[in-house]
Image (tube, helix red, strand yellow):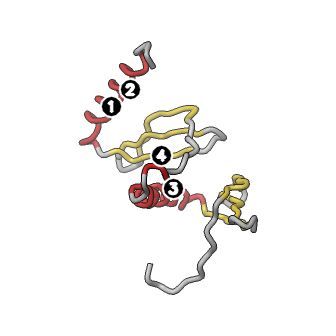
Amino acid sequence: MTETMNKAPIFQTLVAGEARPDDGSVALVVATAKGEKFALEFDAKMVPATITALTSHLGQVVSALPENEQPNYQVLKTTRMGLAMNPQGELGLMLTLEGGGELTIAMNKAYLPVLKAQIEDAIRIAEDPRH
């Protein structure tokens, strides 16, 4: 990010969010540590890429933190999931999140056996009475 641009403050709290179907966007209200509130609006087309970028970069930040400074994250809960396929025949896993949001994750066909094995492991662990 070497290009000159306006720099926003660091946001520490997600205050509210809403879908705006009339203009195809998602709006968030975020706040700084001092309580200053800012409204952000994202075109719906860029939301999945934004989520992915935030998650990826978060992993880089958190991996550099000592264990005692690791943040306690809010878990995203799914209410439904299913397979999706785009017009090019590429597979995806579509997750419906609490609140109705959807996130589709593209899957490389080569990784399907790995995904199958991980799902089988998850089922085995979930059925274990110790968990």
- 32 is higher (above) or lower (below) than 111: below
Work out whether residue 107 or residue 62 is closer to the camera in this orientation and state it: 62
Q: Amino acid at mark 2?
A: Ala
Q: Is residue 102 above or below residue 18?
A: above
Residue receiving disc 3: 51
Q: From the top left corner, tell me how far across and down residue 72 is, in percent.
A: 55, 46
User: How far is disc 3 from disc 2 in space, using C-alphas?
Assistant: 25 Å
Q: Earlier in the sequence, mark 2 or mark 4?
A: 4
Q: Find numbered disc 1 in the image and state the secondary structure of the residue it sits on.
A: helix
- Could you say whether the residue bearing mark 4 is in a helix, strand or loop? strand
Q: Residue furthest top?
A: 129
Q: CA distance from mark 3 to mark 1?
A: 23 Å
Q: Residue 122's mark?
A: 2
Residue 121: x percent and y percent? 33, 25
Q: Amino acid at mark 1?
A: Gln
Spatial separation of the CA atoms under disc 2 and disc 4: 20 Å
Lateral position of residue 108 relative to residue 73, left or right: left
Q: Are marks 2 and 1 in contact (CB under 8 Å)?
A: yes
Q: Which mark is residue 104?
A: 4
Residue 118 circle label: 1
Mark number, residue 48:
none
Q: Callout 4, which amino acid?
A: Thr
- Spot occupied by residue 127 in the image (x, y as percentages of width and height): 42, 15
